[in-house]
Image (cartoon, rainbow, N blue to C red):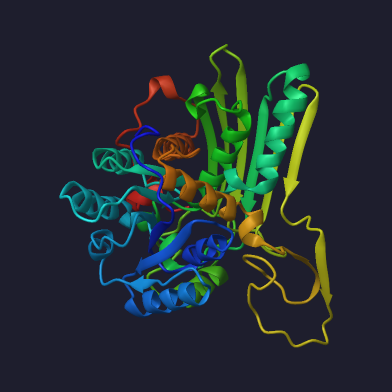
Amino acid sequence: MSDSDTPTIPVLRVGFLGSGFIADFHLQAMLGVRNVRVAGVYSRTPANAAAFAERASAAGLGPCRAYESLEAMAASGEIDAVWILGPNDTRVEAMQTIHAVVTSGRGGLLGVACEKPLARNLAEAREVLRLAEAAGLNHGYLENQVFSTAVQRGKEIIWRRGVPGGGRPYLARASEEHSGPHRPWFWQGERQGGGVLSDMMCHSVEVARFLLTPPGAERASLRLVSASATVANLKWTRPAYVERLRQMMGPEVDYSRRPAEDFARGVLVLEDDQGQKAMIEASTSWAYVGPGLRIQIELLGPEYSLELNTLSTGLKVFLSRELNESTGEDLLEKQNAEQGLMPVLDDEAGIYGYTLEDRHMVECFRTGRRPLETFHDGVAVVEMLMALYRSAELERTLYLADVDLEAYIPPVARGEYRG
């Protein structure tokens, strides 16, 4: 799609596919976005869709309508772009539906955005991309950490002040850790496509790749050379935690028989068009117990560095043991305590990048411009994840020139991983 293909429209009418945890983050983020209306929602649980529509309308982002199907929403003529926010195993089906609606001349959709990761494996990711482009849709990959205000500002400073005199950065480190996902499907390797490596390292490798890429350059200007990874089960296969997980998520999540990895560590080597190498070190875990979700990012170059830790907040509160507090996540995501000295994220949607991400996608879809993150980037992320999974399976460094990952399915997604 070229910038001239789509005339600017005054307000982009967005339809949400999904009404759960991540949809609520995007709804909160949309409060900071101009020229947008959350006009529709579809969920496989009608009551959830109705409640979400009420929240969107009450927040002044509507009027929002709950639809009886994705097809009905996409074909309604009341939606300009769809945000795909459902489980990973539904991504291809969702794009097939959207493709069918658009190519049959119904609805008039302009764009589609999809949450991370784009799909469970490389074949599915390429199919999602193919369907979007075959339908002539603008497409955006929703990787919020790239749009974090700290990441955006930090990259701008490093490449403006550090790189001209010191040379390009050579190492990006990124980690994300918390105590485990909210919904059962995340814990199921076949549905999710993996474990913590698929769920969270998709963030880490892409924010690292973004920081290592020169401003304005294609992300593909850094070529993936090799991958080395280790996966493990550190916490959730212990008998007491197997039972706790079963109680929290239901009998379909049984880590005594079908675990998914709760720890992953990976190293990716990339090369630019001058032959200079850059490295990504990524680490993710569902076995971290602290105040809440912890994201750490570093960028290192010859004469400079950048670092970010989301738990090093400017705002903290102290709550004594004398208080009888109800549990929740009102201070920060994946909150693990209600007492003591607690960091507080005063604007989670902004700090994590959702607000700038949604603002950017809305403006690109509204004006017909190509987003900073597209489904092409989503495919590249899945390729990195599959290389890391294959390396962990083979227990050796994987050189991309020597392997074909197109049909590869990780052991945890094949139902063959035992921890």
Q: In this view, does 153 lie to the left or right of 318?
A: left
Res 69 quadrant in image: bottom left
Give coordinates of residue 185: x percent, y percent: 40, 63
Give coordinates of residue 271: x percent, y percent: 55, 19
Res 267 quadrant in image: top right
Q: Is residue 254 left or right of residue 280?
A: left
Vertical side of 382 occupied by 105: above or below: below
**x 61%, y 25%: residue:** 214
**x 55%, y 24%: residue:** 270
Labels in figure, total: 0
Vertical side of 391 occupied by 201: above or below: below
Vertical side of 162 occupied by 182: above or below: below
Give coordinates of residue 40: x percent, y percent: 36, 67
Residue at the farthest top position = 274
Res 306 quadrant in image: top right
Residue nearest the observer in this picture, 225 or 20 = 20
Using the rendered image of the protein, determine whether residue 91 is visible from the camera's viewpoint: yes
Give coordinates of residue 83: x percent, y percent: 40, 56
Q: Is residue 359 left or right of residue 68?
A: right
**x 73%, y 45%: residue:** 308
Residue nearest the observer in this picture, 377 or 119 = 377
Using the rendered image of the protein, determine whether residue 301 is visible from the camera's viewpoint: no
